[in-house]
Image: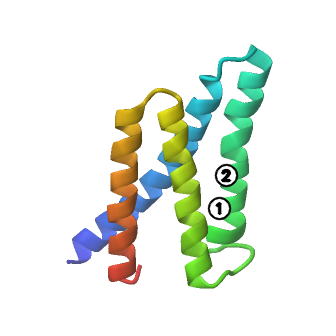
Amino acid sequence: MLILKNANLALAFLLELCALAALGYWGFTLRTGWLLKIIVGIGTPVIAAFVWGLFVAPKATYVLPEIYKEILALAIFAIAALALYSAGRSGWALWFAILVIVNRVLMVVWEQ
């Protein structure tokens, strides 16, 4: 069971990185000029990482009650999935969302 719990924690970390990548990918696929693509493609993941570090990360600057932390984490993941969908990657968005849901449910069940 310990191996499964550790694998789930590793998956959580990979999903966090994938969320940042999805936001960056979305930014660079916007149908605008290159300057705006660069600003959004780099800025959106940076803002998401900043919010994550402030409120959601294990050593967050501001400690929120667990329910609010989970809601914020799910909101960031949902925005990342919607960004993938908006960028024309509906299959990726669906699999990302499924993995996030399974991962977060297991984290709650296993009290991770």
**How far across and how far down the image is residue 69, in percent?**
60, 74
**How far across and how far down the image is residue 32, in percent?**
72, 17
Q: Residues within 10 Å of mark 1 (few under 14, many from 20)?
A: some
For residue 69, above or below residue 27: below
Snapshot quadrant of residue 42: top right
Task: Decide if residue 9 is on the left or right side of residue 50.
Answer: left
Q: Residues within 10 Å of mark 2 (few under 14, many from 20)?
A: some
- Name the residue beneath numbered marker 2: 48
The type of colouring in the image is rainbow
Snapshot quadrant of residue 92: top left
Task: Decide if residue 96 is on the left or right side of residue 82.
Answer: left
Residue depicted at x 39% and y 84%: 111
**How far across and how far down the image is residue 79, in percent?**
57, 49
Q: Are marks 2 and 1 in contact (CB under 8 Å)?
A: yes
Q: Residue furthest left?
A: 1
Q: Quadrant of the C terminus?
A: bottom left
Report the Cα–Cα distance between label 2 and label 1.
Answer: 6 Å
- Name the residue beneath numbered marker 1: 52
Q: Nearer the viewer, residue 82 or 112?
A: 82
Snapshot quadrant of residue 107: bottom left
Which circle marks residue 39 in the picture? none
Q: Amino acid at mark 1?
A: Trp
Residue depicted at x 32% and y 69%: 6
Q: Quadrant of the N terminus?
A: bottom left
